[in-house]
């Protein structure tokens, strides 16, 4: 598939999506959202894709925010539609049954921080900086940042960061639990791929159910939980896994003291 704002590659089952607007520090505009929407659809439907990485082009930025030039002249209804569009694309990332990981190189600010938080987890380079500085523009995060940052770092710290517009460096992001690993810029993609290759050795149905159940632990909006609690969904998902061929293979391999070979069935 052709994209105007993204570079993509598929290797060893890992689909790498690179937001490619380095002259604009990879800022999110309507074209990027359209391309991301299509790229996530490709992750959903392409059986050769087992997992994915989202990153940014160039050494300076993952995504330095939304493209503010597109905000000019919007009325309230249009602004709400803009936020809803961003949230819908990010929910597609969050609810993917295949792991999608952010490899954050440089700035992840505003919409960029929100994009990274929509991914299932994050790695970052030593020069990374995270933040939700929207109050500097007289705004608040609109793509889920008020919710996901709070889920990840807690209410008090989220309040502080979003009200002061302070930036968080890589080490503090690690301490806060905003990222899982900090690497050099040169090793960022390799480390991310290493983790995903490990995940790809596991049972795909089980991985999908892990994502689904953990999301229910943090998503409070009933529109996205189908009215079920995380505990109820866990019981159901456990049963779904129990009748798969992969479960039979996994338990048999354990008893036979060999590595399991999973097929996703």
Image (tube, grey):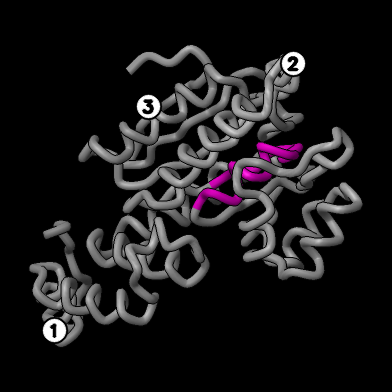
Q: Which residue is mark 3?
A: 38
Q: Position of residue 108 (x, y in %)?
A: 71, 40
Q: In front: mark 3 or mark 1?
A: 3
User: For mark 2, does the 10 Å Cα neighbourhood hold few (<14), some (14 to 19), or many (20 or more) residues?
Assistant: few
User: Is 113 part of what is drawn in magenta?
Assistant: yes
Query: In the structure shown, which secondary structural element does the residue marked by tag 1 occupy?
Result: loop
User: For mark 1, does the 10 Å Cα neighbourhood hold few (<14), some (14 to 19), or many (20 or more) residues?
Assistant: few
Q: Which residue is mark 2?
A: 72
Q: In front: mark 2 or mark 3?
A: 2
Magenta residues?
Answer: 102-119
**Residue visible at 59% across and 35% down in the picture:** 83
Which is nearer the eye, 189 or 29? 29
The C terminus: image quadrant? bottom left
* 57 over 244 or under it: above or below: above
User: Is 61 part of what is drawn in magenta?
Assistant: no
**Residue visible at 11% across and 69% down in the picture:** 244
**Residue visible at 52% across and 49% down in the picture:** 119
The N terminus: image quadrant? top left
* 28 over 49 or under it: above or below: above
The numbered dot on residue 256 is 1
Alpha carbons under labels 2 and 3: distance apart = 26 Å
Q: Are marks 3 and 1 in contact (CB under 8 Å)?
A: no
Query: In the structure shown, which secondary structural element does the residue marked by tag 2 occupy?
Result: loop
The numbered dot on residue 26 is none
**Residue visible at 85% across and 48% down in the picture:** 167
């Amino acid at each position: 598939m052709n994209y105007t704002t993204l570079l993509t590659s598929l290797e060893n089952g890992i689909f790498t999506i690179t937001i490619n607007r380095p002259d604009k520090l990879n800022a999110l505009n309507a074209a990027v959202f359209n391309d991301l929407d299509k790229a996530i659809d490709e992750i959903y439907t392409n059986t050769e894709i087992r997992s994915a990485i989202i990153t940014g082009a160039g050494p300076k930025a993952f995504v330095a925010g939304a493209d503010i030039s597109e905000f000019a002249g919007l009325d309230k209804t249009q602004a709400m539609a803009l936020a809803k569009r961003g949230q819908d694309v990010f929910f597609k990332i969050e609810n993917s049954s295949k792991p999608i990981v952010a490899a954050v190189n440089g700035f992840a600010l505003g919409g960029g921080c929100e994009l990274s938080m929509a991914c299932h987890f994050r790695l970052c380079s030593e020069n990374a900086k995270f933040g939700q500085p929207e109050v500097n523009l007289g705004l608040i995060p609109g793509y889920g940042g008020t919710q996901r940052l709070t889920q990840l770092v807690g209410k008090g710290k989220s309040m502080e960061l979003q009200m002061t517009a302070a930036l968080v460096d890589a080490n503090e992001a690690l301490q806060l639990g905003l990222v899982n690993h900090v690497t050099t810029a040169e090793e960022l993609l390799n480390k991310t791929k290493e983790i995903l290759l490990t995940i790809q050795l596991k049972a795909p149905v089980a991985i999908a159910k892990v994502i689904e159940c953990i999301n229910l632990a943090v998503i409070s909006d009933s529109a996205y939980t189908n009215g079920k609690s995380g505990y109820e969904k866990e019981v159901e998902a456990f049963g779904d896994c129990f009748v798969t061929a992969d479960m039979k293979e996994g338990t048999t391999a354990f008893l036979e003291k060999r590595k399991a070979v999973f097929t996703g069935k």
